[in-house]
Amino acid sequence: MNTSSNDSCDGEWSADFQFYLFPITYILVMVFGLLGNLGALYIFIFKTEHKSPSRVYIISLAVADTAFLCVLPFRIHYHLNGNDWTFGNVACRLTGTLFFSNVYISIAFMSCICVDRYLATVHPHTYLRLRNTRCSVAVSVCVWGFGGATILAFMLTSPDMHKTQGRTSCFENFSENEWKTSLAPYSAFSLIFGALLPSIVILVLYPVVARRIARIKTRTARGALRIIYTILAITVLCFLPYHFVYFLHVLWRTQVIHNCLLADGIYKARRVTMALVSMNSLLDPVLYYFATSHCKWNCKRNFKLLKPKKRRGIYAISESL
C-alpha cells in the first residue's frame, strides 16, 4: 500500500489501484506512442518535402513525446516494485523531471500550432508575411531554451527521494516544509505559465478558428477542423483534469485544504489524472496523421509519402499544417 501523510490529518492516503493502473497505462502508452512518434519523426524529417511552420512545431512535439516515452520503463518498474525506487538519486532526478516537464513542453507546442492556425485563418495577410520556417524555428528554440533552463533549475534544486515505510519514493511524499519552501513556488509558476495561459490560448483561439473554417465547405477545411478538434480533445481529456487536480493537490500540501476526506479524494484523483495525462503522448500521433493527411500519409504502404495536389482558394494557406 502506498501511503502519504499529512501533518494536520495524521492519516494515511492509499490508492492500491495505482499498482495496476500505472504499469498497464504506461506500457500501452510506451509501445504505441513510440511507434507513432518515431514514425512521425521519420516522415517529417526524411520524407516530407513541404516546409511549413507547423512542421517545425510538430517535430518538436514528437521529440518531447519520445523523450517522455523513454523514461516510462523506469516509472513502470517503480510502480511494479510497490513504489520503491532502486535506480539512485541521479536517475530519479532525471527521469522524474523529464516525466513531469513533458506536460508543459507538449502544451506549449500545441499552443504554437494553435497560434499558427489562428493567424493563417483569421489574419491570412499577416500570416503570409510571417510564413517561413525561420520564424517557427526561432519560436521553437525559445520554447526549448526557456523550458530547458527551467527544467535544469528544477532538477538541481528540487527535492527528489524520500524513505517512507522502508520504501524509497521518487518525486512524491514530500514533507510540508519542502512544499512550502521549494515545491510551492515551482508549482505556482508551472500552473500559471505552463498550464493556465496555454490552455486559455487553445480554448479561446481554436473555437474562433473552428467557426471561421466551418463556413468553408471543402476537404481542406474539414481536415483543418479535425486538427482543431483533436487538439481540443487532448487538452480537455488529458491536460485540464491533471492541472485542476494538481492545483487542489498543491492547496492540500501547503495546508490550505485541511479536510481529511477531501485530501484522500485528491490523492486518489491525482493518481488517475497522472495516468490520464500520459495518454497525450499516445494521442499526439492522431494529430500528426491529420496534419499530414494532405500528403496522403498511408501507414499500410510503409510510410510512403505521396506528393500533395495543389488546390486554389483563399484558404489554401491553411493546408500546410
Image: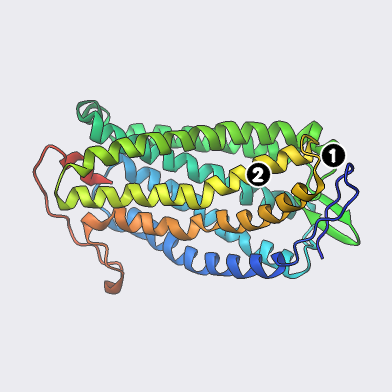
The residue at 77%/38% (across/down) is 257
Q: Is residue 129 left or right of residue 7?
A: left
According to the image, label 1 marks what residue? Answer: 176
Give the amino acid type for the residue marked by disc 2 in the picture.
Answer: Tyr
Depth check: 54 or 167 in front? Answer: 167
Residue 89: in sight, yes or no?
Answer: yes
Decide which of tag 1 and tag 2 comes sooner along the chain: 1
Residue, x 27% and y 62% (percent of image)? Answer: 297
Whether pointer 1 and pointer 2 mark residues with C-beta atoms closer than 8 Å, the reply is: no
Taking the view exactly as shown, the residue that stands out farthest to the bottom is 300
Depicted 274 relative to depicted 303: above or below: above
164 relative to 18 in the view: left or right: right
Question: How far across and how far down the image is residue 77, in percent?
Answer: 71, 67
**Mark 1: secondary structure:** helix
Q: Residues within 10 Å of mark 2 (few under 14, many from 20)?
A: many
Rendered residue at 61%/70% (across/down): 24
Residue 229 point in image, percent of width and height: 35, 50
